[in-house]
Amino acid sequence: MLRLMSGDATVLNESVTAMFDSAKLAAEIALGLIGVLTLWMGLMRLGEKAGVIAAIAWVFEPLLSKLMPEVPRGHPAYGSVTMNLTANMLGLDNAATPLGLKAMADLQSLNPDKKTATNAQILFLVLNTSSVTLVPVTVFLYRAQQGAADPADIFLPILLSTLGSTLAGLSVVALVQRIRLLDWVVLSYGAILLGGLSAGVMYLLTLGAERIGEVSAMLGNGLLLGIIFAFVLVALLRRVAVYDEFIAGAKSGFEQSVRLIPYLLAMLLAIALLRASGALDYLLGVIAALVSHMGMDGRFIDALPTALMKPLSGSGARAMMLETMAHYGVDSFAGRLAAIFQGSTETTFYVLAVYFGAVGIRNGRHALACGLFADLAGICTAIAVCYWFYG
């Protein structure tokens, strides 16, 4: 509408093209998820029957029961939530999404109103949209491809930014849902997790860019394969019907991926029309005018397209980041900030559409507002950290 009002009639053709492209993309994403969802739902079923997931849940159940008081102790959701958040932290994207869908389905089994999100589901979704990624290997790879002098020199800024996003998301959800974070159990787990995270960061900082990627991949993939091996081995030892249980779980994964298509289509269509309308360009112009009027340093504005696109589309944000790197230089202030945005914020609308769509939730209550607040906190932290590190 904005471009049409300014006399740019090509927006009509671009909007129609965007509509059909969105329909095609929604089907491609859903079809792409069929294989991985089928695999992981089958494996998760084995893990549940073998009791391995219950053992994993036991470790973090005291903490999660404080954050999700409506989930009864011993429920399978604790295990699937723990596995999803761990996969996110290790950057295991292929495993994180199906594990997250399993966790959302487990939480949905406790939901008295199947169309409205529960407090636990909202907290879980916000933690996903702001989840800490220990080593964003893909961002390092893009910087290396663009010729960065040290592709991993943004490692610490990304970690600080995503920590800010996670803490902000958790805090705002706790405020809305009246969750007591100043509890000795929560604080104890927080101290242990932060201590372990700090130790891991200090170790990784002693390595070069290539070694960071190698160690991260080895740790993540090794942990993943170890869990899969444990699922199958323990299931065999406990005389679980491995083949039958795997097939039963895999069927649910296939059905879930097909159910996602309408929700993905609605979300992708809205995003495509938003981009075609010129609304993002207009918003950038308003921000630039305000920053200039206030006499502030406006270098961060050159990287803002990546930040504004990331909650809407991961591929769109990636394209914006690469464009910024190519235009301003991969080691420029804008190039580094765009990479930090890419590594420290999440595709909130995509996560909301996929996770809630998979279980048929239509009323997300305060989930979107809290998720976007976490994104905003991550963006602001990224800008502050970038000025701190790179002047």
Image: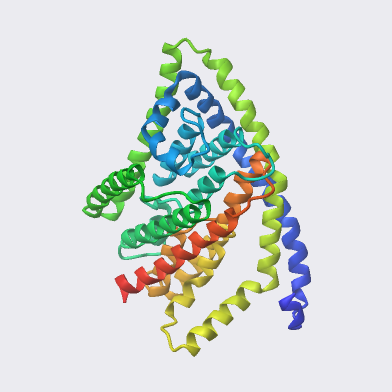
Query: What residue appears at the point 48 percent right and 56 percent down from the top-left corner?
Result: 175
Which residue extends farthest top? 239
Query: What residue appears at the point 55 percent right and 26 percent down from the top-left corner?
Result: 42
Quarter residue 226 falls in:
top left
Quarter of the image that includes the C terminus = bottom left
Give coordinates of residue 210: x percent, y percent.
30, 51
Quarter of the image that includes the N terminus = bottom right
Query: What residue appears at the point 41 percent right and 83 percent down from the top-left corner?
Result: 297
Can residue 152 be seen here? The reply is no
The image shows residue 374, relative to residue 33, as above or below, that is below
Figure colour scheme: rainbow
The one nearer the camera, 208 or 345, is: 345
Q: How many marks?
A: 0
The one nearer the camera, 339 or 99, is: 99
Give coordinates of residue 292: x percent, y percent.
48, 88
The image shows residue 323, relative to residue 230, as above or below, that is below
Instruction: Name the side, left or right, on which 266 lies relative to 57.
Output: right
Give coordinates of residue 123: x percent, y percent.
51, 48
Query: What residue appears at the point 49 percent right and 51 percent down from the top-left corner?
Result: 178
The image shows residue 275, relative to residue 254, as above or below, that is below
Give coordinates of residue 387: x percent, y percent.
35, 74
The one nearer the camera, 10 or 98, is: 98
Can residue 96 be seen here? The reply is yes
Quarter residue 385 falls in:
bottom left
